[in-house]
Image (cartoon, grey):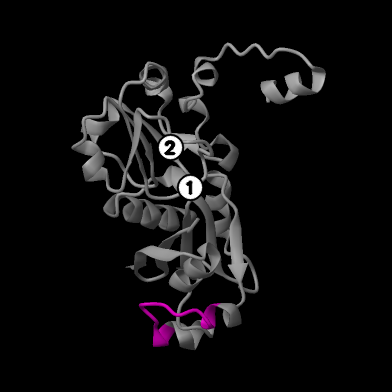
Amino acid sequence: LTNDIADRLGATPVITTAADVNKTIAVDLVGKDFGWKIDDDSNVTKISAFMVNEEKIGVYQNCGRKDWWKNKIPANVTIYPTINELKNSDSKGYLIITDETVDDDLLQNSVVYRPPSLVVGVGLHWDTTKETIKDGLMRCMNEFKLSEKSITKFVSIKKEKDVVGLAELAKEISKPVEYFEKEELASVSTPNPSKTVQTFEGTASVSEAAAIKSSGGELVVEKQKFPPNLTIAIARIQN
């Protein structure tokens, strides 16, 4: 931006930020334009210093926009296809872009970014409470090692009235709720269709179908049942 303004004014740009001067990655700004959140900013200064001083930096990404860095990757930065390869590398610092939990032994030298990548599909009754949904959701996140900071929305079937419990939880954690008509969900292929759900809802799947349809991606958590009145499935948005 500084260079663009200078060109228009016929002036000489003066840039003082170290990352800009060295034309390297600004650790604190990665994914900011896409709504990514830094999980814990306590390491930002340290990893930024590693970056500017051209120490070896490893990057791992399993979700979110791939075009977060539009320039040539700096020579000191290596992108690894798996978290284990990153862990076993000789990198001094790490940039980890993920909706999954990260091992403690990596965290001390990492900046972890949380893209809004997870869509939570919910099948429920009209009287399912906020507490029931929240408990089921947290159990899913913990069991499948996912970060709640990457939840982008809840999705479910359109009913005559919105389920109060789901609306209350969505408001509590500041996430929107998207609803689909039963005909829209009935057209989605899912791994765990139910004849019982078909009978009562007019579609063989609610939680899985809604998560798949909204995300345009694949399930990372297939339908989890919390009898008698809740199912949850989670899909990852594909970018």
- Relative placement, left or right, of 35 versus 57 is right
Amino acid type for the residue under numbered disc 2: Tyr
Point out the frontmost of discs 2 and 1: 1
Q: Which residue is at the front of the view, 203 or 68?
A: 68
Q: Secondary structure at mark 2?
A: strand
Quadrant assignment, res 48: top left
Side (left or right) of 168 relative to 149: right
User: Which residue is found at the position 41% from the left and 77% from the top?
Assistant: 190
**Residue 130 location (% of width, % of height):** 48, 55
Amino acid type at image mark 1: Lys
Q: Quadrant of residue 14?
A: top right
Instruction: Tell me what residue is drawn at x 55 percent, y 15 percent.
Output: 17
On residue 142, the disc is none
Q: What's the magenta region?
A: 185-196
Q: CA distance from mark 2 to mark 1?
A: 13 Å
- Which disc number belongs to residue 113? 2
The image shows residue 24, relative to residue 87, as above or below, that is above
- Residue at image position (53%, 83%) is 187
| Above or below for 47 versus 216 | above
Q: Which residue is label 1 attached to?
A: 66
Tag 2–tag 1 contact (CB < 8 Å): no
**Residue 165 shown in magenta:** no
- Expressed as whole percent of the image width and height from the top left, the position of residue 83 reads 26, 44
**Image point (50%, 38%), residue name:** 69
- Graded by Cα atoms within 10 Å as few (under 14), some (14 to 19) or many (20 or more), the crowding at tag 1 reads few
The kind of secondary structure the magenta stretch mainly shows is loop
